[in-house]
C-alpha cells in the first residue's frame, strides 16, 4: 500500500491538486480551470486525482491553499489550511534548497517571496495593476490567433523588441494594436509585451525587494518562455522554472499537511467527495447594527461551516 499526502490549491482562474508520497515525489497532479465555480472544480479535481492513483492508496494528510482555501478545506476536511505565500515557499525550498527568490505569476495573482536559508523573510502580493497577467496573456494569444502554448515562443524569435506600454492592460492592448498597424512584426510586439509584463511586475510587486539568485519562476505564466527570457534580461542572471511549476502551491500544501499530521491520522474525506453535493450561500444577520454577511457551506443539505459573523453567533456550529 502506498502512503501519500494530498495538496489542493484553488484560485480564481485555476484549480490545482497533487498527490505526493512520503518523500514528496509527485504521484499524481492535475491543473483545471476554475471557471467561476470552485465547488465544481474541486469536485472534478478530486475525481481526476482519484483516477490517477491506485485504489489502495492511503492518504495520511490533506492541505489546502489558494484564494478558495477555506472552501476547499471544508469540502475535503483538510488537516491544515495555509496561505499561498507559505505553501509556495515550502515547495520551492524543498525542491531547490538554495532558492532565494520566488517569482509567482498566475492567472490572476502575482507575488514575490524572498527566502534566506529556506525561510521566507519578506513577500509582496500583486497590486491592482499587476493582477490578471495570465488572463491577459490568454486574451492576447486568442486575439492574435495563436495557441497560448506557442505564444511565448514568438518572443524568442523577435529581432527588435519594441516598447509596449505595460502599466495597464487596456493601454497595453491598445499599444499592441497601434504597433501592429505600423507594420511591426508580431514577434517583436510579443517580445515587447513580455518586457512590459516584467517591467510592470518589477515596478509594482517586486518594488524595493532584494532579488538574489537562485530565482525560481512559478505559476501558470512560467510556461511562457518569452516572459522567462524577459525576466533574465531584466535581472541579468538565469531564472529557473521548476519541474512542477504549475502545481507548486498544491505541493507545498501537501508538505505542510505532512508536517501537521506527522502520518498519525487525517480528517481527509476521501476522493469520493467528487460525488458529494455541496452548496454555499450567504445571508445578512439582523441580530445587531453590524449586519454581518454570513457565509455558510452545506454538504448534502446539512450546514458544515459558517463564517463572517463578528460575534461568533453563527460560526459556532
Image (cartoon, rainbow, N blue to C red):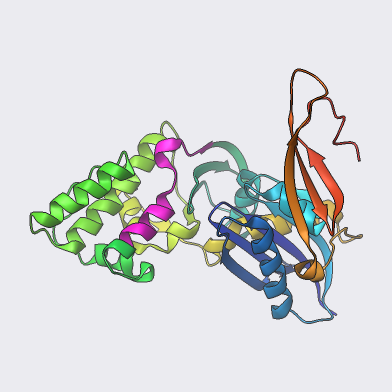
Residue that appears at 71% across and 79% down: 51
Residue at 53% across, 51% down? 99
Relative to 250, residue 102 above or below: above
In this image, 134 relative to 308: left or right? left
Which percent across, then down, holds residue 159?
14, 62
The answer to which quarter of the image holds residue 53 is bottom right
- The vertical placement of 79 against 277, above or below, is above
Residue 56 % position (x, y): 84, 80
Residue 25 image position (x, y, % from top left): 68, 70
Q: Is residue 220 visible?
A: yes
Instruction: Give 190 or 242, whichever is nearer the viewer.
Output: 190
- Image location of residue 64, percent across then percent down: 71, 53
In the image, 117: left or right of 261? left
Q: Which residues are magenta?
A: 124-141
Foreground: 185 or 47?
A: 47
**Residue at position x 50%, y 56% in the image:** 218
Depth check: 54 or 123 in front?
54
Q: Mark yes or no: residue 79 visible.
A: no
Dominant secondary structure of the residues highlighted in magenta in the image: helix
Q: How many circles with numbers are drawn on the protein? A: 0
The quadrant in which the N terminus is found is bottom right
Q: Is residue 136 magenta?
A: yes
Q: Residue furthest front?
A: 286
Residue drawn at the location 52% of the way across and 62% of the way down: 245
The single residue placed furthest to the top in the displayed view is 289
Residue 200 falls left or right of residue 296: left
Looking at the rendering, in which quadrant would you find the C terminus? top right
Amino acid at each position: 500500500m502506498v502512503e501519500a499526502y494530498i495538496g489542493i490549491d484553488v484560485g480564481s482562474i485555476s484549480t490545482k491538486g497533487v498527490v505526493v508520497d512520503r518523500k514528496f515525489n509527485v504521484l499524481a497532479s492535475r491543473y483545471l480551470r476554475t471557471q467561476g465555480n470552485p465547488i465544481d472544480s474541486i469536485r472534478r479535481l478530486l475525481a481526476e486525482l482519484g483516477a490517477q492513483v491506485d485504489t489502495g492508496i492511503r492518504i495520511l494528510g490533506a492541505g489546502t491553499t489558494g484564494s478558495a482555501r477555506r472552501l476547499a478545506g471544508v469540502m475535503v476536511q483538510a488537516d491544515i489550511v495555509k496561505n499561498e505565500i507559505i505553501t509556495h515557499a515550502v515547495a520551492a525550498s524543498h525542491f531547490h534548497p538554495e532558492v532565494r527568490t520566488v517569482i509567482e505569476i498566475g492567472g490572476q495573482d502575482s507575488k514575490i517571496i524572498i527566502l534566506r536559508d529556506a525561510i521566507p523573510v519578506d513577500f509582496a502580493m500583486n497590486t491592482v495593476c499587476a493582477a490578471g497577467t495570465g488572463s491577459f496573456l490568454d486574451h492576447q494569444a486568442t486575439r492574435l490567433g495563436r495557441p497560448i502554448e506557442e505564444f511565448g515562443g514568438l518572443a524568442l524569435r523577435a529581432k527588435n523588441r519594441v516598447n509596449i506600454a505595460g502599466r495597464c492592460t487596456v493601454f497595453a492592448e491598445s499599444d499592441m494594436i497601434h504597433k501592429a498597424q505600423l507594420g511591426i512584426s508580431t514577434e517583436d510586439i510579443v517580445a515587447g509585451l513580455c518586457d512590459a509584463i516584467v517591467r510592470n511586475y518589477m515596478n509594482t510587486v517586486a518594488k524595493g525587494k532584494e532579488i538574489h539568485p537562485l530565482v525560481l519562476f512559478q505559476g501558470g505564466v512560467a510556461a511562457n518562455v518569452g516572459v522567462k527570457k524577459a525576466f533574465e534580461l531584466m535581472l541579468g542572471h538565469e531564472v529557473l522554472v521548476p519541474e512542477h511549476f504549475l502545481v507548486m502551491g498544491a505541493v507545498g500544501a501537501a508538505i505542510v499537511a505532512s508536517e501537521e499530521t506527522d502520518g498519525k491520522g487525517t480528517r481527509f474525506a476521501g476522493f469520493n467527495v467528487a460525488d458529494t453535493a455541496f452548496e454555499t450561500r450567504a445571508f445578512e444577520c439582523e441580530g445587531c447594527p453590524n449586519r454581518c454577511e454570513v457565509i455558510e457551506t452545506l454538504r448534502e443539505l446539512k450546514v458544515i461551516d459558517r463564517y463572517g459573523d463578528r460575534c461568533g453567533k453563527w460560526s459556532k456550529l
